[in-house]
Image (spheres, rainbow, N blue to C red):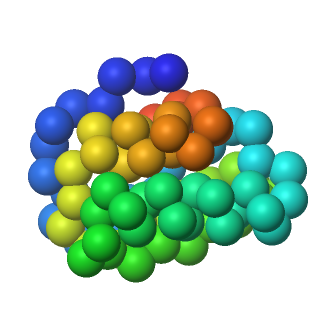
Amino acid sequence: MTQPSHERIPMQATYEVQGMTCEGCARSVTRAVAAELPAVKTQVNVHSGTLTVQGEHDASAVARAVDSAGFVFVGRKT
């Protein structure tokens, strides 16, 4: 797992997540992020292995949520 910075992301960022294979995986990631960061909106794309987070957030909180859901947080996509 890449160590994310504690930088506050102001609006939207897309992260790479490894290990998601189905919509159940997407729901698990979505629930985990919602529990860690209830004020943000998320969109998960299993096929591209991405998680988009909308709203002010801390990348390290996203990493914790992804990890707690059992997946690998790779880092922010550029």
Residue 76 showing in the rendered view? no
Residue 55 locus on image (x, y percent): 26, 74
Q: Residue at 14% x, 43% y: name it.
A: 7
Q: Outermost residue, right direction?
A: 22
Q: Residue at 64% x, 59% y: name it.
A: 28
Residue 31 showing in the rendered view? yes
Left or right: 11 in relation to 29: left
Give the quadrant of residue 29.
bottom right
Q: Residue at 74% x, 56% y: name it.
A: 25
Q: How many marks?
A: 0
Residue 62 locus on image (x, y percent): 37, 48
Residue 48 locus on image (x, y percent): 74, 55
**Front in this rendered view, residue 78 or 29:** 29
Left or right: 78 in relation to 30: left
Give the quadrant of residue 2.
top left
Left or right: 60 in relation to 16: left
Q: In the picture shown, does residue 69 fall above or below 52?
A: above
